[in-house]
Image (spheres, rainbow, N blue to C red):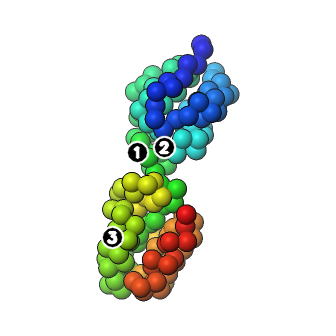
Amino acid sequence: MTTVCNPDHPDITDEMWDKINAIIKTGRNKLGALITVLRECQDVVGYLPRELLIHISQGLNVPKSQVFGVVTFYSLFSLEPKGRHTIKICLGTACYVKGIKEIMDGISKDFEVQEGTTSENKRFSMEAIRCLGACGLAPVIVVDQDIHGNLLPKEVFGIINKYE
């Protein structure tokens, strides 16, 4: 089966399609390759748009329903564009009591990103997490893999603004 690209998708360049096609080719005819192919394609594009899922389905000769089922089941996958950096806001009790709501509101205002969305410039995505398990550091946020705790609202802009 020949893999054909959809050059009309605005978020996927020709160079990305070449990488995607190589990933699909590597995974073709390998039992259980779907999750690996999806993860690697998401690494290339940053998320999994519908057109890409259809392309993967055709390239691996896997039913579209199976591809969509895997993507919607695992939280690892995203159907929406993500920012270059992910801000995780802890909404656990300790963080909430120590002012995380004020910090979250400041981040939303300063960086034009709301909970569960990505900023228009695709710099940040913001997620609310029920508990990060760092109650002793409350209030806590995680930017990418960096943990920032014992935060004061006036410090947060400077911390987050370092992430380009």
**For the residue marked with disc 2, what is the amino acid?**
Tyr
Visible in this render: residue 93?
no
- Which of the two marks, 1 or 3, is nearer to us in this view? 3
> Pointer 2: residues within 10 angstroms few (<14), some, or many (20+)?
many
Q: Foreground residue, 96 or 117? A: 117
Which secondary structure, mark 2?
A: loop
Task: Tell me how far mark 3 sits from mark 2, CA to CA.
Answer: 25 Å
Among numbered discs 2 and 1, the one appearing first in the sequence: 2
Classify residue 154 by image quadrant: bottom left
Classify residue 93 by image quadrant: bottom left
Q: Residue at x 43, y 55 (%)?
A: 121
**For the residue marked with disc 1, what is the amino acid?**
Glu
Residue with the mark numbered 3: 109
Whether pointer 2 and pointer 1 mark residues with C-beta atoms closer than 8 Å, the reply is yes
> Pointer 1: residues within 10 angstroms few (<14), some, or many (20+)?
few
Q: Which mark is residue 47?
A: 2
Visible in this render: residue 49?
yes
Whole-percent x and y of residue 136?
48, 85
- Which of the two marks, 3 or 2, is nearer to us in this view? 3
Task: Tell me how far mark 2 sits from mark 1, CA to CA.
Answer: 6 Å
The total of numbered circles placed on residues is: 3
Q: Residue at x 55, y 19 (%)?
A: 4
Which secondary structure, mark 3?
A: helix
Among numbered discs 1 and 3, the one appearing first in the sequence: 1
Residue 81 vertical placement versus 27 (above, below): below
Whole-percent x and y of residue 42?
54, 41
